[in-house]
Image: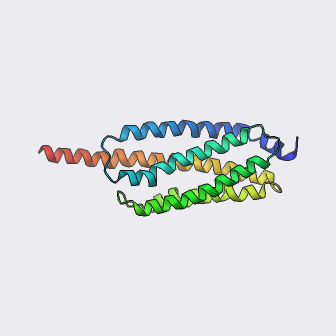
Amino acid sequence: MNVAMTELAKWSNFYVIVGSAAGALIGLQFVVLTLIAVRPATASAEAGAAFGSPTVVHFCAALFVSALLLAPWQTISVPEILWGLLGFVGAAYTLIVARRMRKQDAYKPVFEDWLFHVALPGVAYAVLAVSSFTAPSHTRESLFGVGGVALLLLFIGIHNAWDAVSYHVLVKMAEAHSENREENN
């Protein structure tokens, strides 16, 4: 077994944990979105594409990286190419998310939204892309980079899912209840 594969084998429990969490949270995100979709506003589709879809994408990316690095590869070349491609695709997707956030008018994004929907995912996917180039010569460091990215994407997804749920429950539902009370009076 070569040195790269020995280093990768040390990460198996980490990726089992991160991948399992990402998979479970993807399912939970679908359940929550179904429950809060009582009466979506007409502009909510654009907001969903800007704020909801990226959350599922980040969970899927964490799940994919975890599964990718748990597969019994003979060398690290194929996984490093695949995680590098994911990094480049994720970086491009982050630019699309930024455009969608600016375009939608259902909600005015604040600093925290830009941080967790654009800046942090952009950094995560950039690290993923760069680490694929450094893996052949700095395998151990690259695997720490990939592990950090998987964990960061998981935490970004958790933050964004919580933010979306709390916004819908605490802001939108409160507005709807307030409007109902005004109509009844």
Residue occupying the point 25% across, 46% down: 176
Q: Is residue 57 left or right of residue 177?
A: right
Residue occupying the point 70% across, 42% down: 68
Residue occupying the point 54% across, 62% down: 95
User: According to the image, what is the colour scheme of the structure?
Assistant: rainbow
Number of marks in picture: 0
Tell me the quarter of the picture where residue 71 sits: top right
Query: Quadrant where the N terminus lies?
Result: top right
Q: Is residue 120 visible?
A: no
Place of residue 128 in the rendered image (x, y in percent of width and height, measured from the top left):
67, 55
Place of residue 23 in the rendered image (x, y in percent of width and height, measured from the top left):
57, 37
Place of residue 58 in the rendered image (x, y in percent of width and height, measured from the top left):
56, 48
Looking at this view, is 76 or 179 the one in front? Answer: 76
Determine the residue located farthest toward the right in the rendered image: 1
Place of residue 53 in the rendered image (x, y in percent of width and height, measured from the top left):
48, 49
Residue occupying the point 81% across, 56% down: 138
Q: Is residue 86 visible?
A: yes
Q: Is residue 64 left or right of residue 113?
A: right
Query: Quadrant where the C terminus lies?
Result: top left
- Image position of 62 with respect to 135: above or below: above
Determine the residue located farthest toward the left in the rendered image: 185
Q: Is residue 94 left or right of residue 171?
A: right
